[in-house]
Image: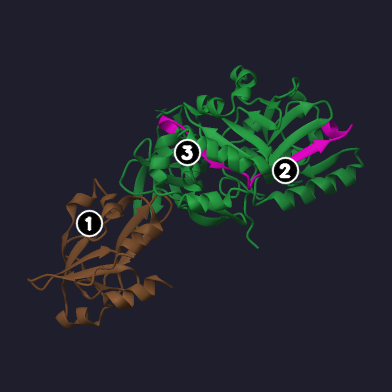
Chain colours: A green, B brown
Amino acid sequence: MTQKTVLNEMHRRLGAKMVDFGGWDMPLHYGSQIEEHHAVRRDCGMFDVSHMCALDVAGPDAKTFLLRLIANNVGRLQTPGKALYSAMLNPSGGVVDDLIVYFVEDGQYRVVINAGTAEKDIAWMNARLAEWNLAATCLPRRDLAIIAVQGPNAKSRVWQVLPETRAASEALPPFHSISVGDYFVATTGYTGEDGLEITLPASKAQAFWQALLDAGVPPIGLGARDTLRLEAGMNLYGQDMDENVSPLDAGLTWTVDLSSDRDFVGKAALLAQPQRYDFLGLVLLDRGVLRAHQSVTSEHGDGEITSGTFSPTLQTSIALARLPLGTAIGETVHVAVRDKQLAARVTKPRFVRNGRGLI
Amino acid sequence: MNVPSNLKYTQSHEWVRSEPDGSITVGITEHAQDLLGDLVFIDLPEVGKTLAAGQEAAVVESVKAAADVYAPVAGTVTEINPALADAPESVNADAYAAWLFRMKPANANDVDGLLDATSYTAVASE
């Protein structure tokens, strides 16, 4: 059965086109996906991301558990509030899910996982807890809602609506969090813009959403969320990586800690099987639109697009792709689009940051 | 749903207008553009290309998806809408004004066999 967030009725009242996303009935757009995209780059917009699942990992062994569970080193989280992006791997080194860990305090972490993988992830985590016989619990917080407000003016709009969060979040560096009463405020996001992600009791979400609407913050659907994250060069689970893809082949090497002595699930597999692909960007030189699964031909061999779209900011098509090792930035490759071979230029896998094109 | 009664339609959401010179003008319906969302690229056929009825004639791509546009009847492409190269979004703005291509039907009577507005409304409401 399709699940609904606490804001479902408000999306429908705003005229959203609803779609199934990972088993959740979510807004694709509220009229124009492209206008929503531009609103976030130029001003701000808000996303209902309550389908994502917040978990509280707590107990004396919580840190030990996360140190063994995920590929990035939770030991790097020294100060309360700091956040870490990482992947949870299977023993073959494939990605079970990507996630963010927030360090709340000693023995207490908040982990945010993807919607479509939530049940699988929770089962996986509980199985590891039992296997390792650790004193920690993993509690899904479906009593919470998550609203992301993103864009150059996002913070000022949030402070207008929730003045009590201003002092605490004004000085917060990127990728940090702080609790202000019922509001868990984090400087994280999935757009490449400044902004906040606010986790709050589901019972307060409708009032907060309405207050942001009244403050002139437009709602943004999953369509623009996808073009924004792709321009920012951020991976999407299930598309850019999955259980059969190594993080080393998905541009996630920076989230994998292979340098310390720490052992974690999948580490042996990663060490035994080094990187096989470069994960890079493509900008289409010919006319058309790059899409996932299109094959790429280069002088070094063949590759595949994992995510492709039209970039509203750059006004051309862009893609993330797994390309043969040795592919250089600036090279021209060819992409099979229907019956044509279209030329594309290889770029860094990051196209837009803070409203500006990088390529 | 906006389905002008002076046009003919296909099951695959093309609209067809018969012109005085015997040619037909083809576009996609308002319902089709609504399903696709913001269009960002339209790949049109070459003028002079001969198409069978139901053959892929053009591709319309939105931010999210690509969709084929089919020849409503057999015939030859006589003209394409040059304005769409730089303004694919004009199809979103007015799907019945922003035509895609024109054809000379191989058999003039074939157009009569297409759906009328009432039948197409039923198809699009499914």
Circle 2 or circle 1, nearest the eye: 1
Report the span colored magenta.
Answer: A41-64
Q: Is residue B94 visible?
A: yes
Question: Can you give x and y, in whole percent of width and height, for residue A81 in the image?
Answer: 71, 24
Q: Do callouts 3 and 1 mark residues in contact (Cβ within 8 Å)? A: no
Q: Residue under mark 1: which chain is it in?
A: B
Q: Amino acid at mark 1?
A: Ala
Q: Which callout, 2 or 3, points at the residue further toward the start of the chain?
A: 2
For label 3, the SS is helix
Q: Is residue A97 magenta?
A: no
Residue A283, image quadrant: top left
For label 2, the SS is strand
Q: Residue at x 43, y 43 (%)?
A: A298
Q: Residue at x 17, y 83 (%)?
A: B109
Circle 2 or circle 3, nearest the eye: 3
| Quarter of the C terminus of chain A within the rendering | top left
**Which residue in the protein does label 2 denote?**
A89
